[in-house]
Amino acid sequence: MAGTITRADAPAETSDFSAIAVPANARMRRWPLTMAWWAVCSAMFYIVVAATLALNFGTRNALIGMVLSVIVYGAVNAVLSRYAIRTGLSVALFSRILFGNVGAAIATLIFFATAIYYAVFEGSVIAVAISTVFPSISYPIAALIVVAYSVPLIFGSIQTWLDKFNGVLLPFYIAGLIAAVAFAIGSYGYSNAWLSFGPAGGSPANGWWDCFVYYMGVWILMMFTFDYARFGREEDADYHARVNFGTPFYLVTFLINGVVGIFLAATIPVDGAVSEVSVVLALLKLMGLAGLVFVWVSQTRINTANYYLAATNMEAFVAQLTGLNVGKLVFAFVVGAIVYVLMLANVFHYILQALAYQGIFVVAWVGIALAHILTGTYDRLFGATIEYRAEHIPAFNPCGLVAWFGATAIGVVLLNAGAGYASFSAPVTALAAAGLYAGLLTFARPGWFVSRPT
């Protein structure tokens, strides 16, 4: 890896590279990496969030918010994916550079905890679907079934298994999306009413901003991107930045899924508030067993990413704290056990609260990452060498930590300052983090980043 210190002493076929940068001989061809990554584009969440935003702010505002999100996500992830490909670093390893060893552990903890939360949500949707179609299977048993088959799916690596598995399922997801629309039209007819879907009192004039900011709540996808992009080959960097991790991916993930979600919500009668569960139940009533297959495909694909990233980042977190490297397999079971307990514990309200605050930390991380990459200060300090080994990194990097916690504090205050300010919490946090970090870099010393020369 040009410009990166690596310790590639683990075989490419068996290492998950949680402790080292991905070496050149372990990089993936563009199509397999595309199939592995595009597992993330399929989730009932994307369908439901668009429908919910349209219901509360109007279809027009929801569409504007989605289009703006596609543009911003594409631009940000183009920068992050190119850097991850160039260096081979994971979020955990890159965070050592930004925050020092202690700060990196916090970033990794937030990352794997968030991935676990999403695995709980997506797994619960499948479990509800199973117990609905097969009433003899109780929800706890259905949840156990979901966890039991999800854990083994990540025993293999991105390079050897997840790309193939998700590549096979992708056409079924696309077919299921089309079938859901066809069934809805066949049962209820087509109407342009979905274009004027919205709140009874009319759509707020600036509702597009609220919709755009809502999608910032899932900037964890930027971290997802980083951990997948590091497996890309340097000669494919343009393709990955522009297509695989770029705008086309988010056109499918946000816009196409979102349009389908709005249409279905406006067409199919839903019992109660629009939610992942209510939409799933409506699809099952409409499509029967085919609906269950569609739900299983969509949720299983996204959960391969959730479980994989949760396990590898938990592995990195424990290794950072204890120095023990026990392998991803052990943490796959640990993640599965935690997911199952949370699926049964009915703690969704508390998880949503935790995600709101963790989301502030995540957008601050993204702002700092962009500032670090785009300013080039690190390169001017150290040349082509990137040092990420724990024994050469200080416990605390004041530059990154001050920017991270300072911006996060601003975001938390805005989040709790009332509706008029809460919608600015994520954008202000990201801008403040980038500005603080870039400003502090003007005073940066080599010792902030490297405690012991190579």
Image (tube, grey):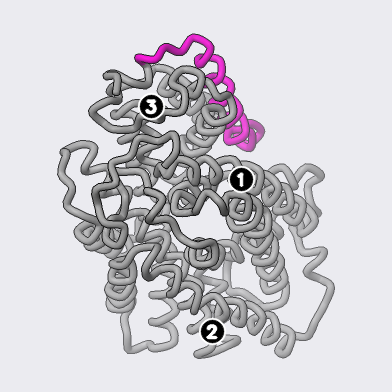
* 2 or 1: tag closer to the N-terminus: 1
Taking the spot 28% from the left edge, 41% from the top edge, the residue there is 7
Residue to which mark 1 is pinned: 78
Q: Is residue 445 magenta?
A: yes
At label 2, the amino acid type is: Gly
Q: Position of residue 443 (x, y in %)?
A: 49, 9
Position of residue 306 in the picture relative to residue 101 (left or right): right
Q: Residue at x 52, y 20 (%)?
A: 377
Please say if 128 is above or below 389. below
Quarter holding the C terminus is top left
Q: Residue furthest top?
A: 443
According to the picture, the residue beneath numbered tag 3 turns out to be 99
Q: Are marks 2 and 3 in contact (CB under 8 Å)?
A: no
Q: Residues within 10 Å of mark 1 (few under 14, many from 20)?
A: many
Q: State the residue position of label 2.
A: 291
Q: Is residue 251 left or right of residue 334?
A: right
User: Can residue 146 be seen from the camera position used here?
Assistant: yes
Q: State whether residue 350 appears in this view.
A: no
Q: Which residues are magenta?
A: 419-447
